[in-house]
Amino acid sequence: MVNFIYNDSLQLKAGNALLTADLVVPEHAKGLVIFSHGSGSSRLSSRNRFVAEHLQRSRFATMLFDLLTEEEDQRQENRFDIALLTTRLIDAVTWAQQSDYTKDLHIGLFGASTGAASALSAAAALGGDIIGAVVSRGGRPDLAGEVLPDVQSPTLLIVGGLDEEVLDLNKWAQDRLQCLKDLEIVPDATHLFEEPGALEMAAQLATDWFRKYLEPGKQHPLRER
């Protein structure tokens, strides 16, 4: 049974915006995973929360937060403003580095759909010393195309086998990543991983990746040999 030292919502200051975040910190946490949701979604994404709960059972702290205020989310262009979303994610990382609950934890990023682009862009900006690992689920890493060669954090791309267009985009992005990287295909899964067992497999792949690279004492080469 996992006990938690913090499990509540909080207000996160990001620039001039005040964003709502849900933070869960297990006892003896192995690391912190901050989620970046896709366009039109929020911290309440059922799929991201499923993955977060899977991580929590493995003693990883998780933070899901709204990258936009309610007013900002009304403007469609904000949902695809990767630069803005990246800045918000960096602000969340900075907050986590200062919080008493999370400041001693290695940080990983989990991005879904367009959230993968902001996760990879934030990882490129912050460097491998700050971001220990990145996982993308059904992501659009191609939207971070210009900075992909700058990512130093070990990166896992998870894509549904039937999500053919996104799979091609992930293969394109994988070729441009110069870090330690892998592409995992969930058989017979579509973009939203709605098929029986598909989301469970994605959650386990993500957990295994973070376990490999975020737990204290784990070392990794920053560049692929």
Image: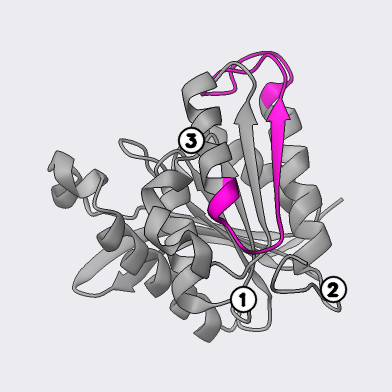
Residue 34 image position (x, y, % from top left): 54, 60
Residue 14 image position (x, y, % from top left): 30, 72
Q: Earlier in the sequence, mark 1 or mark 3?
A: 1
Residue 194: in magenta span: yes
Residue 101 image position (x, y, % from top left): 61, 77
Q: Quick one: label 1, few (<14), some, or many (20+) residues within 10 Å? A: many
At 59% from the left edge and 48% from the top edge, which residue is drawn?
Answer: 175
User: Between 142 and 52, which is closer to the camera in this rendering?
Assistant: 142
Apparent side of residue 54 relative to residue 127 in the rendered image (left or right): right
Q: Please report the bounds of the magenta region as a residue range.
A: 174-198
In which quadrant of the rendered view does residue 53 lie? top right
Q: Is residue 9 visible?
A: no
Q: Quick one: label 3, few (<14), some, or many (20+) residues within 10 Å? A: some
What residue is shown with label 2?
Answer: 218
Looking at the rendered structure, the kind of residue marked 3 is Leu
Apparent side of residue 184 relative to residue 15 in the rendered image (left or right): right
Between circles 1 and 2, the one closer to the viewer is 1
Looking at the rendered structure, the kind of residue marked 2 is Lys
Residue 120 image position (x, y, % from top left): 49, 59
Label 1 with label 3: CB-CB less than 8 Å: no
At 70% from the left edge and 74% from the top edge, which residue is drawn?
Answer: 222
What residue is shown with label 3?
Answer: 169
Q: Is residue 205 visible?
A: yes
In the image, which disc is placed on residue 128? 1
Q: Where 114 falls versus 26 (above or below)?
A: above
User: Between 26 and 165, which is closer to the camera in this rendering?
Assistant: 165
Q: Quadrant of the C terminus?
A: bottom right
Q: Earlier in the sequence, mark 1 or mark 2?
A: 1
Measure the alpha-carbon separation of dots 1 and 3.
24 Å
Measure the alpha-carbon separation of dots 3 and 2.
30 Å
Q: Earlier in the sequence, mark 3 or mark 2?
A: 3
